[in-house]
Amino acid sequence: MQNLVKAALEVREKAYAPYSRFLVGVAIRGASGRIYVGANVENSSFPEGWCAETSAIGAMIAAGERQIAEVCVAGDSPAPLTPCGGCRQRLAEFGAAATPVHSVGPQGLRRSFTLGELLPAAFSLESSDD
């Protein structure tokens, strides 16, 4: 997990957040073991920016991978930082209820969750068959 934490913390420093100054970095480990990173990008025409999770998922999809095995979210907040509601659903689209989501800060791991804990009633392709 250390390489996932390192990747999330490193990409966090590349975030573009001139308005909030709240930098977020995300590292996703695909099922292949490959790591994909993303940072948040703000825009003056709120809410036209995008979250770090969106950037990392985009990198994963562009590389041809479709399955998330593990997620690491890096930010500098006093409490554990978790993905927003929209990003929880985005992650659930490519992960599973048991997929680990780690919250880290500059001093290391704050807390780990599963996608199921963060989004217990996620939409899925399977649930849309009803």
Image (cartoon, rainbow, N blue to C red):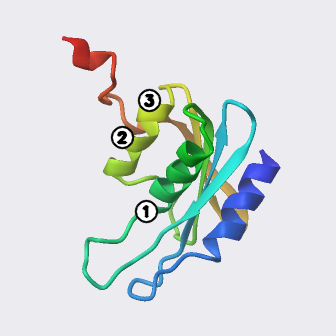
Relative to 29, residue 124 above or below? above
What is the CA distance from the residue labelled 1 to the residue labelled 2?
13 Å
Residue position for label 2: 89
As drawn, the residue found furthest toward the bottom would be: 18
The type of residue carrying mark 3 is Gly
Indicate the position of residue 109 as horizontal and vertical percent values: 69, 54
Please tell me which residue is depicted at 32% across the width and 49% down the height of the picture: 86
Closest to the camera, between mark 1 and mark 3, is 1
Crowd around label 1: few <14 · some 14–19 · many ≥20 (10 Å): many
Residue sitting at the far right: 2
Count neighbours of disc 3 (C-alpha within 10 A) and say few if under 14, some if 14 to 19, many if 20 or more: some
* Crowd around label 2: few <14 · some 14–19 · many ≥20 (10 Å): some
Residue found at the far left of this picture = 130
Is there CB contact under 8 Å for labels 1 and 2?
Answer: no
Side of 78 where 33 appears, left or right: right
Q: Is residue 106 visible?
A: no
Residue at 35% from the left image edge and 80% from the top image edge: 43
The residue labelled by disc 3 is 116
| Residue at the far top in the pictured view | 130
* Sequence-first disc among 1 and 3: 1
Q: Between marks 1 and 3, how big is the CA–CA gap? A: 20 Å
Drawn side of residue 76 relative to residue 124, left or right: right
* Residue visible at 43% across and 34% down in the picture: 92
- Mark 2 or 3 closer to N-term? 2
